[in-house]
Structure formats: C-alpha cells, structure tokens
Image (cartoon, rainbow, N blue to C red):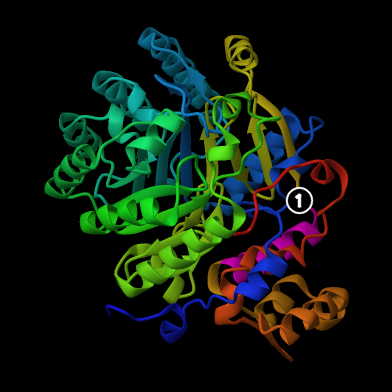
C-alpha cells in the first residue's frame, strides 16, 4: 500500500481550506453531556438510584482505576496526578481503593461479569509489582473478573518507568492490552517536556509484550510540543511504525498554562505554529493510511484486524470516558481520585483533590463530588453523537423507534445547520440518513457539535477545549 494517499483510500480526505475554516475548539465527546455539566447537587441518593436501575438492567460491568502518582512531572500533562518520588504513598491509597470498592460492591450486583478493566493515571506502573498484585487481588475479591482472557483488560504504562519483568507480571495478573505513552522519541522534544523514553526501551517492552501474548499494543503520540517539526515528528513516526503497534493515537497538545501551571515550564515560542501542526497531522495521517492503518476517528488509528477496527466495521464501536470502546454496553464503575463513572442514565465524578477523596473514604462515604442525571433529550443526543463519531453515519430509523420521535422534525434546526456543511462536502443528508464524507471525517468533532444542546451554555461556556485538528 506504499504511496497510497488519503484521498485514494477513501478513509479520510484532507481539504486545507475546509480544515482552516472548521478547525475550532470543541469537546472530544467521551461523554454527552460533557463533564463541565456535572454539578455538586448530585449526591449519594442519586447514585444509589442509578445503581438500583443498573442492577435491574443487568448489563456487564466495566471497571476503571485511577492511579494518580508519577515520579516525574511531564510539563504538558493536564491529567489529575500527584508528583512524588516517595513510593510509600501508594500503599495507603491502595487500601482506600479497596475500601471504596467495598462500598460500591455493597450496592452493585457484583455477579455481573467484568467485560472491561482499565488502569489509568497518572502512571499505573508507578506502583510496584507486589502492589499491582495486591490491587488485582482486591478487585477479584469484590468483582466477577473473567478468567478466560476474553475480557478487554488494559493498563496504561510509561515506557520509561516500566521493566521487562513488569510486563510478565501484568500478563500474569490478567491484563491483555497495553497502552504506551510514547509522545515523541526526539531527545530535544523530550528535554523540553521533561519526559524520557528511548526507542530501545519501548522496543524491549513491545517484544516482551508480544512474547507474553498481549492481544493488543497501543501507542500515544502528541503533536504540537516544543522543538517539534514535521521532520522531527516523522522520525518518531517511522520508529513507531517499525514497532508496528496495533493501535495508534496522535493527540493535539492544548497549551493552557493559565489552567495547568506545569505547562508554564515550556517555552511557547519553541512550539510549532498552526501551519506546521497541520502539516504534522496531515502528513502523519497520509503515512499511517499508506502503512495500512484504518482511520477510526479523530486522533485514532488501528490495524484492520484489531478489535477496534472490527467493531467499527460491524457497527458495534462505542465511546466512553476511556475513548473508543468495544464494550460500550457495560456500566462503568470507576474508582480513585477524580475517577468518572457512567452507570444507568447518570454520570458522576469522585473528588479531584486527594485530601477530599481520602476524607470521604475514611468516613465510610462513597467519594462522589458531582454528577448528572441525564434527561431524555440528553440520552437522545448522546445516541446521535455517538453514532456519528464512531461510524461516520447515522440511520434515523433506530433512533426514531427508540426515542419515539420523527428525526427530521425533532432536529430540524440541526439539519438546517448541517446544510452548509453539506454544501462544503462534509456530510450527505438523505431523508433517513446522515453520511459523513471522507472530507468530513477529520472534522467529525465539529459535525457532532451541531447536535450539542449544551454547547456554550452554563459551565460549558467557560470550559476551554482543545482544537479539533
């Protein structure tokens, strides 16, 4: 497939003029409504009602565990993390995770199988192998984990903070998917952002993971960092392609030093300008498609045989707080500081501050800080946005049947807004379908924003989002 362009493959098509016009800031839609709409009026009573509904429905479970600790600060990071070289802080935190699980296990029907498990951070590999075993033993005590390797059990790892021996430990514990935060291999870029992992380190971990039989290896890259250019980024991309990950994400760095103080330690003058960033993502997209990867959506690519690509082909790809998902039918219960759950028709988030989280657990309370009960309009729009962002196509008939509406009447204002996008070649509107064109796929977030009734209202009006491209 060498030399095949984006346009020839038909998965996505780059139109510079349209990119420039539509490349605004907007949500990533890992949920709808998005997190800025969560409010502190949501408490344990609403949570208990949601769990009761969830138990009646009997959906399988997805579990997320947030490990917030990092031994070194990455200047670009906007995640909820605690920087400390004192690894003894992990023990008390894991004990509180166990107590939080016990509180939720008293409410949830834990006989339901756990089809999806994810450890994120922070840096989950910050904790020792023995502490990893302790946490997984605790999870198995409270929940019904699968023992046949059929679930999607994933962990995020920092290649510079993970050993080959730890890879074997992770597989032993039941993990079958790895996500590696590579970001960039260029030494000047790494020095500028204070994150270090060499291609050789990553290669050793990839080799070990394949020897251990991991089902899928994913890598994350970031473009827009100091000292980057297309030529430097291409060298990183070439090195990554040699490693042949099953999935690859390329995230646009959002520089918001007013919100994230550590970003002030980077020199904004050294960051690539808007035109250079567009060059990076344009040529990288061409290169990945030419190498045989499928454009899943937004920043994500996967090999055609990967479960993510198969789910998209078969119309079962979904989206949640972990991004694109193949087990979107699950109720998501999340644990740890700042973790977000999605159970029944509700979202809720734990306390973001570790002291508040600890205080709640120590007093025997579920550490919920804020949340949202979705209304019928929220649920309808969430279904529409998910269909578009996962499949680039929307059939009105199932939506009309599920929500008892006439799509063209209910969404008449939105259809009118889409007409200008249709004139620009981003979408095709038919009487019972919306199709996103090859040109529109790279701008799918902008298309989804048409259906966002919360956009620019309430808390979301003050929220800062990353740019679409």
The answer to whether any part of residue 109 appears in the image is: yes
Task: Give, as a single range, the part of the protein colored magenta.
Answer: 375-389
Main secondary-structure element of the magenta-colored stretch: helix
Q: Quadrant of the N terminus?
A: bottom left
Residue drawn at x 59%, y 66% as measured from the top left: 389
Q: Nearer the viewer, residue 198 or 110?
A: 198
Magenta residue check for 303 = no
The answer to whether any part of residue 317 appears in the image is: no
The kind of secondary structure element at disc 1 is: loop
Residue 267: percent from left, percent from top: 56, 32
Residue drawn at x 46%, y 78% as measured from the top left: 11
Q: How many marks?
A: 1
Q: Nearer the viewer, residue 76 or 359?
A: 76
Magenta residue check for 386 = yes
**View extreme (bottom): residue:** 431
Residue 45: percent from left, percent from top: 75, 31
Question: Circle 1 is placed at which residue position?
Answer: 374
Residue 388, by quadrant, is bottom right
Residue drawn at x 16%, y 33% as measured from the top left: 164
Residue drawn at x 38%, y 56% as measured from the top left: 231
Q: Is residue 315 left or right of residue 397?
A: left
Q: Quadrant of the C terminus?
A: bottom right
């Amino acid at each position: 497939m060498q030399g095949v362009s984006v346009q020839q493959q038909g998965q996505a098509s780059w139109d510079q003029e349209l990119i420039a016009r539509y490349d605004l800031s907007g949500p990533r839609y890992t949920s709808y409504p998005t997190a800025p709409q969560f409010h502190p009026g949501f408490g344990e009573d609403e949570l208990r009602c949601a769990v009761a509904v969830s138990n009646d429905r009997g959906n399988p479970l997805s579990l997320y565990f947030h490990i917030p600790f990092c031994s070194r600060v990455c200047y670009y990071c906007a995640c909820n993390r605690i920087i400390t070289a004192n690894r003894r802080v992990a023990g008390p935190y894991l004990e509180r995770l166990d107590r939080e699980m016990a509180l939720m296990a008293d409410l949830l029907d834990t006989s339901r199988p756990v089809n999806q498990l994810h450890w994120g951070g922070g840096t989950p590999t910050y904790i020792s192998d023995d502490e990893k075993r302790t946490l997984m033993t605790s999870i198995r005590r409270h929940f019904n984990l699968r023992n046949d390797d059929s679930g999607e059990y994933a962990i995020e790892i920092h290649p510079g903070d993970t050993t080959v021996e730890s890879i074997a430990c992770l597989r032993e514990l039941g993990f079958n998917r790895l996500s590696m935060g590579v970001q960039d291999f260029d030494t000047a870029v790494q020095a500028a952002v204070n994150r270090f992992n060499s291609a050789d380190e990553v290669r050793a971990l990839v080799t070990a993971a394949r020897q251990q039989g991991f089902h899928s290896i994913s890598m994350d890259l970031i473009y827009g960092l100091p000292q980057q250019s297309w030529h430097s980024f291409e060298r990183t991309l070439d090195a990554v392609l040699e490693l042949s990950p099953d999935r690859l994400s390329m995230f646009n760095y959002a520089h918001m030093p007013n919100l994230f103080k550590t970003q002030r330690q980077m020199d904004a003058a050294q960051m690539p300008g808007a035109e250079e960033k567009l060059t990076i993502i344009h040529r990288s997209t061409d290169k990945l498609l030419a190498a045989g990867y499928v454009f899943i959506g937004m920043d994500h690519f996967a090999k055609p045989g990967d479960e993510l690509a198969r789910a998209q082909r078969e119309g079962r790809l979904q989206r949640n707080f972990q991004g694109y998902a193949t087990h979107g039918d699950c109720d998501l219960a999340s644990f740890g500081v700042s973790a977000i759950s999605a159970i029944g028709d509700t979202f809720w988030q734990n306390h973001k501050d570790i002291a508040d989280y600890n205080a709640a657990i120590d007093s025997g309370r579920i550490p919920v800080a804020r949340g949202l009960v979705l209304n019928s309009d929220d649920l309808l729009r969430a279904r529409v946005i998910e269909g578009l962002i996962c499949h680039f196509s929307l059939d009105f008939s199932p939506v009309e049947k599920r929500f008892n509406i006439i799509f063209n009447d209910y969404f008449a204002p939105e259809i009118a807004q889409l007409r200008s996008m249709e004139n620009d070649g981003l979408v095709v509107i038919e009487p019972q379908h919306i199709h996103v064109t090859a040109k529109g796929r790279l701008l799918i977030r902008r298309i989804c924003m048409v259906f966002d009734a919360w956009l620019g209202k309430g808390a979301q009006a003050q929220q800062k989002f990353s740019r679409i491209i």
